[in-house]
């Protein structure tokens, strides 16, 4: 008996990268797996293919597991609803949804087109809404359900050239938090993971000098999709009551992120003016303000 025997898990983006690793691991742990992947390019600009999802599902079946594939887009609500219905009709139940499906269209914000903004937000944030909204009533009726969403340090910390991606990923954090709060009485859990892993997304990072080349090479060797999968699938297991949290996985580290809470307060009983804010409040708070460093400034050390 595997850790997830008898459970059914829908995994989006399951034909490549982190989603593929999680799908194969879920199958080995005994879960019934619905592997969803549009089979498109990293930018999402092409029509896609059914092959990546089916190849992963076939690999699970060849190893003795149970899996079916789907190549619809998570941006299509009706298609996502059909995925939910397919999972429940094929396997008799649905227990968890893991949602790493994503695309990238990186550019500096002053050069970003509406199309590039809309496409990234549609896949990441709208896609997360779709998988949650299409399944939440089923989970509420069953009084059990679990979501594992994917955020990014590009949103949690920041990364130049990824305003569309960062905005969508921070929206997912808010969505997951509310689902966790609203789901408590119905035993519905939701968490988010910011993954560090060598995937085609990470491989797209531009290498501009020898230092960045060496850093990317270290990332490639030390951070694998399966390490992310260990946490994602643990969150799907019986006995796990963790909900409403933000994690990161970086190599063999599992990191629990803080969530926005007040760090400093200034009061003026006479009331503030723009001048007194400039003279007093902002200078007093300056040492508690976050700098504009990107992810590498927060994680300056090599992966463990």
Image: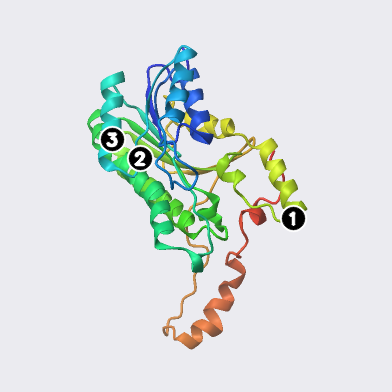
Q: Residues within 10 Å of mark 3 (few under 14, many from 20)?
A: some
Q: In the image, is 31 to the left or to the right of 303? A: left
Q: Position of residue 184 (x, y in %)?
A: 32, 39
- SS class, disc 1: loop
Mark in the foreground, 3 or 1: 1
Q: Residue at x 25, y 39 (%)?
A: 78
Instruction: Choose the circle earlier in sequence order: 3 or 1.
Output: 3
Residue bearing mark 1? 209
Instruction: Choose the circle earlier in sequence order: 2 or 1.
Output: 2
Foreground pick, 5 / 130: 130
Q: Position of residue 106 (x, y in %)?
A: 52, 56
Image quadrant in which the C terminus is located: top right
Mark number for residue 73?
2
Q: Position of residue 118 (x, y in %)?
A: 38, 56
Q: Position of residue 75 (x, y in %)?
A: 34, 45
> Residue farthest to the right?
210
Q: Residues within 10 Å of mark 2 (few under 14, many from 20)?
A: many
């Amino acid at each position: 008996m595997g850790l997830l025997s008898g459970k059914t898990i829908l995994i989006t983006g399951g034909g490549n990268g982190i989603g593929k690793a999680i799908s194969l691991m879920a199958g080995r742990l005994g879960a019934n797996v619905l592997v969803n992947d549009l089979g498109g390019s990293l930018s999402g600009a092409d029509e896609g293919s059914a092959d990546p999802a089916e190849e992963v599902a076939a690999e699970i079946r060849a190893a003795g597991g149970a899996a079916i594939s789907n190549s619809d887009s998570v941006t299509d609500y009706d298609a996502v609803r059909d995925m939910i219905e397919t999972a429940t009709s094929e396997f008799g139940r649905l227990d968890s949804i893991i949602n790493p499906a994503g695309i990238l269209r990186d550019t500096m914000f002053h050069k970003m087109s509406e199309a590039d903004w809309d496409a990234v937000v549609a896949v990441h944030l709208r896609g997360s809404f779709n998988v949650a909204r299409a399944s939440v009533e089923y989970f509420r009726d069953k009084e059990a359900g679990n979501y594992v969403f994917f955020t990014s340090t590009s949103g949690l910390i920041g990364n130049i050239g990824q305003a569309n991606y960062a905005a969508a990923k921070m929206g997912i954090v808010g969505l997951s938090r509310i689902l966790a709060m609203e789901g408590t009485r119905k035993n519905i859990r939701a968490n988010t993971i910011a993954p560090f892993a060598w995937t085609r997304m990470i491989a797209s990072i531009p290498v501009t000098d020898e230092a960045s080349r060496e850093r990317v090479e270290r990332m490639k060797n030390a951070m694998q999709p399966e390490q992310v999968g260990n946490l994602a699938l643990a969150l799907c297991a019986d006995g796990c009551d963790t909900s409403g949290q933000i994690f990161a996985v970086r190599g063999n580290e599992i990191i629990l992120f803080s969530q926005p809470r007040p760090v400093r307060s200034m009061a003026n009983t006479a009331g503030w003016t723009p001048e007194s804010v400039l003279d007093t409040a902002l200078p007093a708070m300056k040492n508690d303000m976050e700098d504009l460093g990107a992810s590498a400034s927060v994680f300056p050390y090599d992966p463990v």
